[in-house]
Image: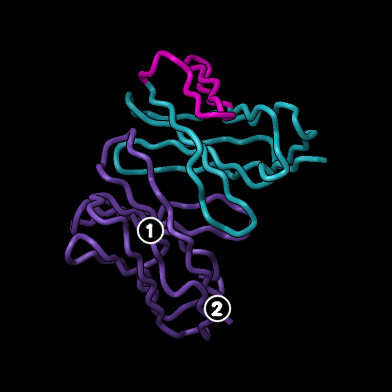
Chain colours: A cyan, B purple
Amino acid sequence: AQKITQTQPGMFVQKKEAVTLDCTYDTSDPSYGLFWYKQPSSGEMIFLIYQGSYDQQNATEGRYSLNFQKARKSANLVISASQLGDSAMYFCAIKGYQKVTFGTGTKLQVIP
Amino acid sequence: GAGVSQSPRYKVAKRGQDVALRCDPISGHVSLFWYQQALGQGPEFLTYFQNEAQLDKSGLPSDRFFAERPEGSVSTLKIQRTQQEDSAVYLCASSLYPDREETQYFGPGTRLLVL
């Protein structure tokens, strides 16, 4: 069984500031992958960043970085230098063997 | 190359009607997933295919839901005798391999409204 918890239903951030979106997980799989997706109001799911459970280093993709703390079972997304276009829903997901479980999401709003 | 496509993009059905939702994955992608996303919620797993084999259908909410991928490429999700609670966005995603680190790429979704 696997579970994702996103405790922040909504977040505000000032343009150009950094923001951290929280994600904790639980799984019985020894090997798994953690993903973050962005879903703008248009509805498409856009892949942002991936972290493997055995990766030693935190993943980074441009302005996105993943703060992976395996012992705490957390995989927080950090967005640096926020832009107005970052306003969207953000979903954390865990992928075990065959199955993917998503969290309930965090709605991020970037303030001009 | 082309991404994942889904059709129709919008579907309005009367309660009790049968509907069929189509997913065209990225060419060559082995894995295909279907999800149901209710308004304001995260996607909920429905079923998983590896090529033509349906390896996991544990998320299908009832026996009114049926999915197939007969030739290992295009997939169809069929809902029989639709109910109002079936109203949601149905998302399809594909990945190149089944491995845990393989990224899923999502289609635009089919928004189903059951009246």
Name the foreground residue: B14 vs A38. A38
SS at circle 1:
loop
Reading the image, the residue beneath label 1 is B4
Q: Mark 2 belongs to which amino acid? A: Val
Percent position of residue B18, x then y: 40, 82
Kindly tell me whether residue A14 is visible in this rendering. yes
Which residue of the protein is positioned furthest toward the front in this rendering?
A: B1
Q: CA distance from mark 2 to mark 1?
A: 25 Å
Q: Please tell me the numbered disc located at residue B83.
A: none
Query: The C terminus of chain B lies in which quarter of the figure?
Result: bottom right
Reading the image, the residue beneath label 2 is B114
Name the foreground residue: A62 vs B111. A62
Identity of the residue drawn at 26% across and 56% down? B27
Between circles 2 and 1, the one closer to the viewer is 1
Which residue of the protein is positioned furthest toward the right in this rendering?
A: A112
SS at circle 2:
strand
Identity of the residue drawn at 45% across and 42% down? A101
Please determine if labels 2 and 1 lie on a single subunit. Answer: yes
Percent position of residue B31, x then y: 27, 50
Magenta range: A54-76
Identity of the residue drawn at 39% across and 64% down? B5
Crowd tier of the residue under label 2, counting other residues whose Cα lies within 10 Å: few below 14, some 14–19, many 20 or above: some
